[in-house]
Amino acid sequence: MEHRRLGPLWERRTYGNKRVMLLETLVHEGATLRDLLADRQLPEDPLLDEVPADRRLAVVLDRLAPTERAVVLALGHPGVATWAQAAEQAGADQPEVIAERVRRKVRATIQEQSRRDEQRVDGPAGLWVPVRSSGA
C-alpha cells in the first residue's frame, strides 16, 4: 500500500478514480497534450508584461505621467531606436518635443535616484539608513 502511494501521481489513479497526466504526454505522432490546449496564454500574462523587473525602472516609470510612461515603454519595442520614434509610436502629436521632454525627465530621475542610492548604507537589520554627515 505504501509503495503504491509513493509512486508518481501520473502513474496511478487519484481520489475519485481519475487519472492525472503530464502535459508532455505523447498523444499522437509527436503531438503532446500541451499542443492540444486551446489557449496557452494565462490571463495575467499581459499584466505581468507591464511590471518592470528592475527596481530602477519601476522608480522612473512611477514618476512619469501616463503619456510619458508610454513613450518610455515604447522605447523598448523592437525597431524603436530613438526617443522620437518611441514618442511617435506612443501616439504623441509632437514626437520631437515630447521625446526631448521625456528624455530629460528620465535622465534627471535616474541621476536623482543614483544620488540617493549612493547615500544609502545597509543598517544592522539589513535595512538601509541614510548616511549621516560627519560634521554633526
Image (spheres, rainbow, N blue to C red):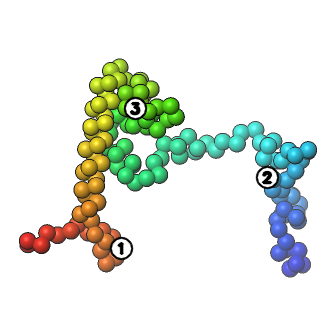
For label 3, the SS is: loop
Quarter location, residue 102: top left
Q: Which mark is residue 73?
A: none
51 vs 103: above or below: below
**Which corner quadrant holds the N terminus?**
bottom right
Amino acid tagged 3: Thr
For label 2, the SS is: loop
Dot 2 crowding, Cα within 10 Å, few <14, some 14–19, many 20+:
few
86 vs 130: above or below: above
Specify whether 44 is left or right of 115: right
As measured in the structure, the alpha-carbon distance from the residue carrying label 1 to the one carrying label 2 is: 42 Å
Residue under the point 40% across and 54% down = 55
How many marks the image carries: the answer is 3
100 vs 36: above or below: above
Which comes before the other along the chain, label 1 or label 2?
Answer: 2
Quarter location, residue 38: top right
The residue that mark 2 highlights is: 23
Specify whether 11 is left or right of 56: right
Quarter location, residue 18: bottom right
The residue that mark 1 highlights is: 126
